[in-house]
Each structure stands twice: as C-alpha cells, then as structure tokens.
Amino acid sequence: MKKREEVEDLAFYATLISFATLFILGLAMPRSEIVASVLLTLSSGFFAFSTLVTWRFYSGIIGKIYKALLAASLSLFTIEVSYFIGFLYSTPIYAISIFLAPVNVTLGISLLLGLKYMYDFWVKPVESSRGFYKAITEGIVVSLIIAGIVFYIGKIEFLALRYLVFLSFSIIVLFILYYIADRLKGGRIGESWKLLLIASMLYTIRNIVLEASIIAGVPYVKALPAELLAICSYICAGYGMLKQRF
C-alpha cells in the first residue's frame, strides 16, 4: 500500500509540474488563451474522470454522495470545454457566460448537495449538524463583505458580477471544506480532504485575482497567469478524489 501511494504521489507531482511548464510556455505563444483553455479542459477532465472512477468504486448511500460530486465535476468540465470552443471561435466572454448560466446553477446545487452528503456521512455521526450550517453562514458573511466592497467601488458590470458570484460561491465551499478537513485528519482519507481543501483555496484565490483584474480594467489575456491556479486546483481535486478509494 505504501509503495503504491509513493508511486501515486510521484505521478501527481509530475502532472503538476508538466501542466505548469506547458502553461508557462503557452503564455509566450500567440492566442495564449487557447493554450490555457486546453490545459484547463484537460485538468478539469481529470477531475471529472477521477470523480467518475471513485463513484463507480462505491455503491449505496456512499454512491449517492459521489453521484452529486460527479455532477459538479462534469459541470466544471462542461464550463471549461465551452470556454475553449468560445475562444477558438473568438466568441465574447459575456456570450459564453450567458450560455453557461444553467450549467453554473447545476454546479452550485450539485456541489453543495455532495458536500452536505459528505458531511452527513463522515462528520455528522460524531457531532451535531449545526457545524455544516455554521460553515455556510461564515462563508456567506465573508462573501457579503467582499460583495459590499465591490459595490462600494462601483465597478458593476456583467463580468464583474459573474466572477463575484463565482468568488462568493467558492468562498462558501472553502469554509465547508475547511470544516470537514479539520475533522477528518490522518490516513488516506485525511490526505484526500487536505488535497480537496488546497484545491478550493487555489480556485478561490484565482477568482479573487480575476475579480480584481476586472475591477481594475485589466483584460482577461493579461490576467491569464491566474488560470494556472485553476489548473492546479483541478489536478489537486482529482487526486484528492482518487485518494478516497480505499
């Protein structure tokens, strides 16, 4: 088992380094947003595939948990594929975002359901369910503070609002994951939740950078390096899901 985990860890780090290297090289190429989008599609595809493999590994009530998370990971993959196609045909970002509105709703609902199922299965048996809702409340409070700052600045436009919603949701998810990971330490499952927490942190920081760049009037192409955080986030999340198989 230990030997297998060492091999898995090496493959994980090699994947991170490979994707980061390709991303950095891609920034120097024409239409660098397409290169970044390809890597985002591949890394989110790895996350979706890992969730699928883990879902097929379980059955019964545990299977229901991973079924919700599978829907969330497939939604993220759909989003990245759509942006790749959009960039390929020079489609405006706002048009792609409008098209993806139903997918974003599916992502939000399925991810929250999946995390709630996870909490009920792993944490609730040893403590009350108030903790889950406390984590959500804390995340909402922080999100409202950030939203208040954005509205105070007065930079209210479609893309700013779109990324503000994404940022707010990722903050809520981050609080939930921190709460769960803090209670599931040690062993393979502890490492799994640590990776999922790291993935959520990276994705939240990415959303902060993109929101700040929009407020500052920085074009998306100039803020493209932030997408490396999303790529690493997807890879960490994918490996974290694979570690949930015993």
Image (cartoon, grey):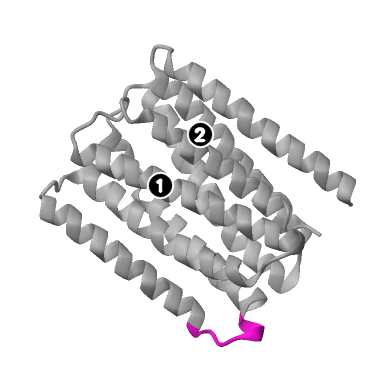
Identify the residue shown where x is 53% and y is 70%.
Answer: 179
14 horizontally vs 26: left or right: right
Q: Quadrant of the C terminus?
A: bottom right
What's under tag 1, amino acid-wise? Ile
Question: Which residue in the protein does label 2 denote?
Answer: 40
Q: Earlier in the sequence, mark 2 or mark 1?
A: 2
- Where is residue 60 drawn, in percent x and y? 74, 71
Dot in front, 2 or 1? 1
Q: Is residue 170 magenta?
A: no
Secondary-structure class at tag 1: helix
The disc label shown at residue 2, or none = none
Identify the residue shown where x is 44% and y is 73%.
Answer: 135
Q: Is residue 18 visible?
A: yes
Number of numbered discs visible in the structure rendering: 2
Q: Is residue 48 visible?
A: no
Q: Are marks 2 and 1 in contact (CB under 8 Å)?
A: no
* Residue that lies at the very extreme toward the bottom in this rendered image: 128
Q: Is residue 108 above or below residue 230?
A: below
Disc 2 versus disc 1: distance between alpha carbons?
16 Å
Foreground of the two, 245 or 134? 134
Question: Which residue in the protein does label 1 denote?
Answer: 205
Foreground of the two, 3 or 32? 3
Identify the residue shown where x is 66% and y is 44%.
Answer: 49
- Locate residue 86: give its quadrant: top left
- The magenta region covers 124-130
